[in-house]
Image (tube, rainbow, N blue to C red):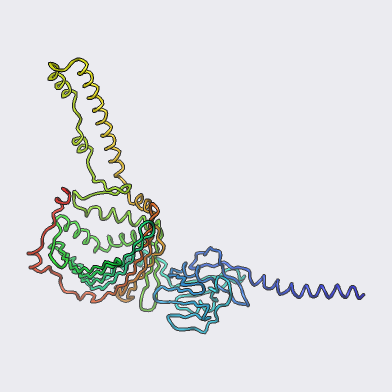
Amino acid sequence: MRKLATWALAFVLVLSFAWPSMTASAQEGTLKLVVDGVEVEGYEQPFMSQGKVLIPVDDLFQEAGFNVTKEAPGKLNVTNSYVTLDFDIADQQISVNGKATDEVFPLTLRNYGNYISTDFLDSLEGFDVTVSEDEQTVNVTTNRVQDVDAFLEKLMGADLQSYEANLTLDQSMEATGSEEFSMNMLMDMAMSMTTEPVALHMTSKMTMDMGEEAEEVTTEAYFTEDGFFQSDGEEWTKLPAELSDVMLEASTTQVDPVAQLQLVKAFMKGIHVFEYDDVYIITQTMTNEEFKTMMNDAMALFSGLLPEGVDSVVTEGTVVEEVTEEEAVTEEEPATEEAVEEDAVAEEDTATEEEAAEEGATTEEETEDVVADEEAVEENLEDVEVDMGSILDMLNINIDKYYVVTVVDKATLFPQSTSGTTIITMSMDGETITIKQLIDGVFSKFNDVKAIKVPAEVIEKAVELDFSEIEAE
């Protein structure tokens, strides 16, 4: 009897430890995460803990179109510029738009604690969260516009005839490998623009720092029906009329709402549009493949803007000027059979049969060399036809980060501001270059810009650029 009681007690003890374990196992079961109808896949998934459903921050906000930045282990920032959250496991705190919340954090030690409860997420502006009755799925609905094409079409139809913009571009470049160097460039731009007629006036100040060397350049430019004029602070130059006309025609086409919409769709990938009470927040991300497509489209769009004679293509690290097969043959024109016969007749009086035979052999070898040269030229001509995708592959370009935000006034559909971060790395032959670019801009004076005209003094003094000289060089 005592032995049975001992076994019974042991069973109760085992069961008492097993029961919480089984309960915890049931609580730790993962749920599916669905954001705006799209199931989010990944290693981290929502799970139940102490009666609460916890959602992984990274996957949730990335799928929702937010920018997610891991500043350090246990510190995370997510934002779309309108709603910004900072997670700090050391301070045990979550801040929303710079203000600390009462939310308990962290609720778990998984993934450095970067999980939030469904209740907290549901309290944020622009989010609605429900859990299915069987507790197997977490459904998150955001305030994103679902029909982006229709929104862009409406945006392009805004009555924006003129505006001013102030932009700051902060760019850094670092190279590692056999030759290490770094360069920082800061550019401040102020511009005024009208759409009817298309006209632009811009001033810019660029400061470039390359370690021991520093340079500051100030420029001013006008672009109107009179042409494109630019000054580097010393003299004014003007682009040739044919090039200015092409640029003006392209700009006029872009003003057309339908044409502009097509350009926007072609160039803006990964768009998310958030709708708030007074503004729309447009965010844009880009992958490597989307970047290559955009660059190819850009080359196709701007190839017509290059004047004749300066078209050149970079292939295998060498700049090869485009030449026609006819020009190549003219430069390397071989001696014809008639010319060879005339030379032989002229030398018959002094040359022996042996010398004539040797000369014939030499001429044949020279002809073969010329043919080989022609074949080499043809191969080079074939190599010239390299698309932008091949060049990007050669440079091994990788988009580490691309996130651009534009704030649009909801009532007028006019842009209020823009900001973005781009980090790109490219490598070739053991050399790696990292380019980081930050842009920040504010728009103002909508439909309040006076007509832009090129000063008569500028038109009079401007020196027109001659691309034929560039071609000759």
Q: Which residue is drawn at 46% across and 77% down?
A: 86
Viewer-side residue, 248 vs 81: 81
Q: Can residue 238 be seen here?
A: yes
Q: Quadrant of residue 146?
A: bottom left
Q: In which quarter of the image is residue 383?
A: top left
Query: Residue 472's x, y, as percent?
Result: 15, 48
Query: Residue 374's x, y, as percent?
Result: 26, 34
Q: Residue at x 82, y 73 (%)?
A: 10
**Identity of the residue furthest to the right in this view:** 1
- On the picture, is 217 further left or further right than 129? left
Give above or below for 103 relative to 217. below
Q: Which residue is drawn at 28% across and 70% down?
A: 186
Query: Residue 436's x, y, as percent?
Result: 36, 65
- On the picture, is 104 further left or further right than 414? right
Location of the N terminus (image quadrant): bottom right
- On the picture, is 320 further left or further right than 66? left
Give above or below for 75 relative to 431. below
Viewer-side residue, 27 vs 288: 288
Give above or below for 386 relative to 352. below
Q: Can residue 290 be seen here?
A: no
- On the picture, is 405 further left or further right than 455? right
Number of callouts = 0
Query: Residue 468's x, y, as percent?
Result: 14, 50
